[in-house]
Image: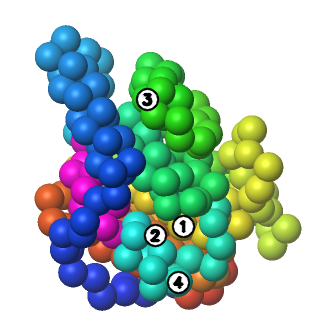
């Protein structure tokens, strides 16, 4: 393991007007999504508490933990985390495999005048394989890909390698918490920060301590 946990206590923070307006609109659209029973197509999709996510992202920003402004949200759904990061002046990208959710995220942020990018793809980058394991998901290098020190994971349509991302955010599905930590361990560059939302008032922050690939 080449990451460390950074102490963090969930607290309420004042929301700037633009952030509060964005959260209100996102909540409204999410409620409409559920009322129309569209979530049946995505039964494991559960939104986070946006105010808590904003507080955590604001905290790491004020503490100067990320070394730059490149941000990725793994499994971005409606794009709320990505939008909040953009409002904190990050160059924000959401990674989401469900094209319907990508469209809804793009519409939400465009209507709110928030500049961010969404990519419809898996958050598992080329060169790695995820699979179901006892106790939850797991991730391993794809042996057929031929890993080497020159291998730099990248998402299609992104101009930078994954190791150049300064700040990651994820709300893992149940049973995938350890897999997401293993993914962060495998692909993040040294010094990268991960904000992981595990549930209401359960947020953890991690720092990658050295660059290495999983065995």
Q: Residue furthest front?
A: 17
Is residue 110 placed above or below 38 in the rendered structure? below
Task: From the image, state whether disc 3 or disc 2 is nearer to you.
Answer: 3
Asked if residue 124 shows in the view, the reply is: no
- The label shown at residue 194 is 2
Spot occupied by residue 100 in the image (x, y as percentages of width and height): 44, 19
Spot occupied by residue 50 in the image (x, y as percentages of width and height): 27, 51
Disc 4: which residue: 64
* Residue 48 included in the magenta stretch of the image: yes
Q: Residue furthest right?
A: 150
Q: Residue at x 48, y 75 (%)?
A: 61
- Badge 2 vs badge 1, beta-carbon distance below 8 Å: yes
* Residue 162 included in the magenta stretch of the image: no
Task: From the image, state whether disc 4 or disc 1 is nearer to you.
Answer: 4
Which one is earlier in the sequence, the residue at label 1 or at label 3?
A: 3
- Badge 1 vs badge 3, beta-carbon distance below 8 Å: no
Disc 3: which residue: 108
**Overall secondary structure of the magenta section:** helix
Q: Residue at x 77, y 56 (%)?
A: 160
- The label shown at residue 80 is none
Side of 8 where 158 appears, left or right: right
Asked if residue 62 shows in the view, the reply is: yes
Which one is earlier in the sequence, the residue at label 4 or at label 3?
A: 4
């Amino acid at each position: 393991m080449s990451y460390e946990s950074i102490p963090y206590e969930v607290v309420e923070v004042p929301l700037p007007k633009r952030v509060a307006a964005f959260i209100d609109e996102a909540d409204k659209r999410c409620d409409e999504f559920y009322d129309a029973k569209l979530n049946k197509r995505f039964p494991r999709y559960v939104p986070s508490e946006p105010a808590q996510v904003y507080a955590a992202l604001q905290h790491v920003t004020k503490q100067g933990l990320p070394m730059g402004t490149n941000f990725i949200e793994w499994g971005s759904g409606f794009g709320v985390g990505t939008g909040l990061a953009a409002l904190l002046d990050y160059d924000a990208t959401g990674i989401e495999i469900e094209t319907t959710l990508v469209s809804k995220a793009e519409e939400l942020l465009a209507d709110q005048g928030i500049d961010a990018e969404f990519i419809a793809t898996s958050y598992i980058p080329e060169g790695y394989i995820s699979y179901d394991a006892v106790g939850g998901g797991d991730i391993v290098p794809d042996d057929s890909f031929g890993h080497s020190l020159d291998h730099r994971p990248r998402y299609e349509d992104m101009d930078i390698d994954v190791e150049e991302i300064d700040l990651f955010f994820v709300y893992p599905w149940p049973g995938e918490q350890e897999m997401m930590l293993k993914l962060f361990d495998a692909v993040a560059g040294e010094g990268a920060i991960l904000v992981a939302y595990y549930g209401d008032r359960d947020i953890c922050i991690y720092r990658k301590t050295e660059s290495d690939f999983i065995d």
